[in-house]
Structures are given as C-alpha cells and as structure tokens.
Image: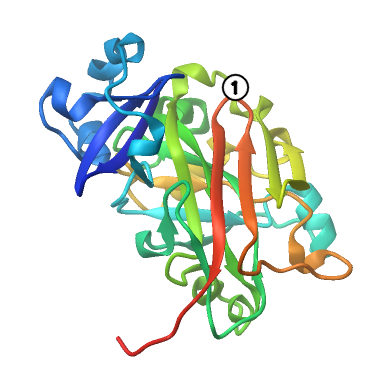
Amino acid sequence: MRVATVEVEGTIRIGVVTSEGIVDATSRVGGETNLRQLLANQQLDGLAPLASATPDLRFEEVRFLPPIIDSQHIVAAGVNYDSHRRETGRDRSAHPTLFIRWPSSIVGHREPVVRPSVSERYDFEGELAVIIGRRGRRIAQSQALNYIAGYTCFHDGSVRDYQRHTSQFTPGKNFDKSGGCGPWMVTKDEVPDPSTLVLTTRLNRTVVQQASVSDLIFDIPHLIEYISTFVTLEPGDMIVTGTPSGVGDKRTPRRYLRGGDILEVEISGLGTLMHPVVHETTSAQ
C-alpha cells in the first residue's frame, strides 16, 4: 500500500495511492489528516481496503507534502554507503555517523528545493528513508524490521561549505526547504527485504548516482538498534540511511545544484521523488 499526505484546496488529507490516482482516506475512513497520528493509533491497516477503491483525486489535483509532516525525530546517517566512503577518502567508522534534520528543511514531491543565497555549493544526495511505525527503545537488530511502518525516497540536500564549517553537519543539512521526501510511504509488507532495493538519482534526466541498498555499511536493523539506544523512537520518526557515490562535490569538475535543474530520486518499488531547483530570494523576515 502507498500512503501519501496531500493538500487539496488548502486542506491536508491522507490519501491511498493507486495507479489511477488518489483515494481520499480522510473523507472515507473518519477524518484523520495526520499520518504520524494514524500510525501512533495503529490505524494504518484500516486503510488497506482503499487500495482497490476508485480514486477520488487525480494526481494533478493535489499538492504533495512529505508523507510525515511533523516527525519528532529525523535522524540521518552520513557516509553510510561504502562507495561514498571510498569517494570521500574516509576510513570505516566503528559506529554510524549521525546528524539531525528538522521538518522545516524538507518539502514534498514536485515542490521546489531551494539553493540558499549564501552558498554556491548546494549538493544532491539521493537516499532511502525508513518510517517508524511503533514506539521502541533499545530495539534489537533481530526485531528492528518489526518497528518499521514503511519506506520512502529522500533528498538529503547538503550545503557543503556550511556542512564543513566545523565537525558538526547540522548547519549544512538544515537550510529551509533544502531537502525533500516522498512522494509517499510504501508499507513494509511490499518491501520484505530493503537491502534488495536499488537507488537512482538523476539530474536533468542524467543518472548521477546508482547503487543497491545492500552497499550500506550499517544496514537498517543496525541503524535502528544503535539509534534506539539513545532515543525512544516514536511512530512517524524517520531514519535516513545515507547516500551512495556520485555526489556533486566529489565530481570532476564539481557539479552543484543550480536554479532550473530537475532532480529525481527513484527507488525500485517505491517510486520517484522529483524536485525543481530554485534560487533563494532574500528579504527581511
């Protein structure tokens, strides 16, 4: 099942995605508009019959929001594909390199991502994101997949100069509207083994990244176990698993995102997340 969060004429709705359009689950099932809350209430399975229903909305009628618009925790792994580790020249780490993203840094499918005015080093990173479905702390790797609600595509847009001002990544990973997520969540029953997924990033229709998720240094169960040792994972939390080689910062010549570019992150079986790139317009706030 594919579940999206969309906006229709100014109202937020949960939608079940079919090949023909979107079934308005908010209208049909009882009014819930927050996918995080629906997961917390363990109501996701109640949407399953809608996957075969006649759509209420065409894709062009909706504005896609990130599947989870208000995650309590968004924890991302850095340098977690072996191919990317090699292109950066880093040694293997004994533990995952982690940083935090804020919801304000993330937009939905088809929404513009913004190159900030203070930098010309805005880079692309296609990634797989895991959406947590159950509350848990100190989760063993052997049980980790049972805590997953589903998976989605992620663009971990990175402002490289700000990322490297210090050893902490936070500034370069959290510019407003610099990242993206979506277009929807695919429930875990459709992805029995996430390591078999293939991630492809395209820039203006040219493939710039492509790798199997099996190239992760710290796989999804390992990340869930490690992260849940220091924070209680809640329904709707996201773990962003890392990017493969091919980022613009490591190309010769370097290739950063510019206004007018079209970025796509496709993951086999999940769908394709698309963003146009725009330059930030500056004004006093």
Q: Is residue 26 left or right of residue 44?
A: left
Q: Residue 187 appears in which quarter of the rendering?
A: top left
Mark 1 neighbour class, 10 Å CA radius: few under 14, some 14 to 19, many 20 or more: few
Residue bearing mark 1:
193
Percent position of residue 55, x then y = 31, 19
Closer-to-camera residue (47/115): 115
**The residue tagged with tag 1: helix, strand or loop?**
loop
Percent position of residue 273, x then y = 54, 43
Q: Residue 213 appears in which quarter of the rendering?
A: top right
Q: Is residue 79 left or right of residue 31?
A: right
Q: Residue furthest left?
A: 30
Residue 128 in view: yes
Q: Residue furthest right?
A: 252
**Residue plotted at (65% across, 69% down):** 258
Q: Quadrant of the C terminus?
A: bottom left
**Residue plotted at (76% across, 68% down):** 249
Position of 252 relative to 188 (above/below): below
Q: Give, as a three-letter code, the residue at label 1.
A: Asp
**Residue plotted at (67% across, 51% down):** 243
Q: Is residue 173 left or right of residue 260?
A: left
Closer-to-camera residue (82/123): 123
Percent position of residue 122, x then y = 63, 71
Position of 255 relative to 194 (above/below): below
